Amino acid sequence: MLRLLRHGLRRLIAARRRHLEATLAPDRHAYRRARTLLRRHLSPAQRREYERYGAFTVVGPSGRRYRIGYGACINIEVLSRAGTVEYRLCAGPSGVPIPAVMLAQKLMLEAQEAAFLQIAIKHPASPHAF
Amino acid sequence: MGVMNELAVLDPSGHSRAAWNPEIPDEVERARRLFESLVRRGYRAFRVSEAGSVPGTVFDPRERETVMVPPIEGG
């Protein structure tokens, strides 16, 4: 039990650190470069969604739909067939601006969904769920 | 100047680019070394085109664009 708690705490700290690294990156130039690359690799429909809502939808090889929101942590919503949020996922690279995290998540979910799901940690759909 | 193919490496600067002409062996070799060193460090390679992205672990100098993603961790 104690080991599980320690493991969970370690993961939480890693996720927080990743979010802070990505959020506090002082380099606006880096942010812009990452955003340019992200936009270039979005499909036209994803680009429209991203420009409008700051989030875009990807479909994995399994047919499962995910919405990647602006963020580096717990920013992936796993959608039901009806479009409601079932739960959220957290996984991404460290030390890169947020748009680069979002691009990494998109590439993984579209091309290596199973591998990504093995790494990602599940979180409730809302902070008050579970 | 011929066609230039590229690796885009996600990093703290947003991304870095390494370009090569597939007809120039020295440039291809330099890109191959970079690709292989990144894969050894846990990066994942995605060959991207309008048709979508395909993961790969072997350098292909004919690929137009490859995005290199740093190791992913859950949290």
Image: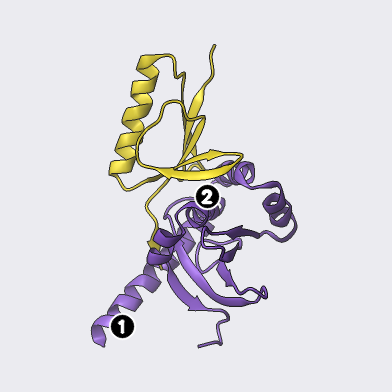
Q: Residue at x 59, y 65 (%)?
A: A65
Number of marks present in the image shown = 2
Q: Return the residue at label 1.
A: A5
| Direction from residue B52 to residue B36 in the image, left or right | left
Residue B74: x and y in percent read 40, 65
Place of residue A75 in the rendered image (x, y in percent of width and height, measured from the top left): 55, 66
Which one of the lettered chains is coloured purple? Answer: A
- Chain of the residue on which disc 2 is drawn: A
Which element type, helix, strand or loop, lies under badge 2? helix
The amino acid on which the numbered mark 2 sits, given as a three-letter code, is Ala
> A65 or B39: which is nearer to us?
A65
Which callout, 2 or 1, points at the residue further toward the start of the chain? 1
Where residue B61 appears, x then y in whole percent? 42, 26
Kindly indicate whether the residue at mark 1 contacts the one at mark 2 (C-beta within 8 angstroms): no
Hey, what amino acid is under mark 1? Leu
Establish if B39 lies above or below A124.
Answer: above
* Residue situated in front as seen by the camera: B75 or B64: B64
What chain is tagged by disc 1?
A: A
Vertical side of A122 occupied by A55: above or below: above
Q: Which chain is yellow?
A: B
Look at 42% across and 55% down and name the residue there. Answer: A94
Q: Real-space Cα distance between discs 2 and 1?
A: 31 Å
Residue at image mark 2 = A100
Instruction: Classify residue A83 as left or right of residue A13.
Output: right
Residue at (64, 73) in percent of width and height: A81
* Label 2: how many Cα within 10 Å (few below 14, some 14–19, many 20+): many
Q: Residue furthest top?
A: B1
- Which quadrant would the C terminus of chain B be assigned to in this image? bottom left
Q: Secondary structure at mark 1?
A: helix
Quadrant showing the N terminus of chain B: top right
Residue at image coords 55%, 87%: A129
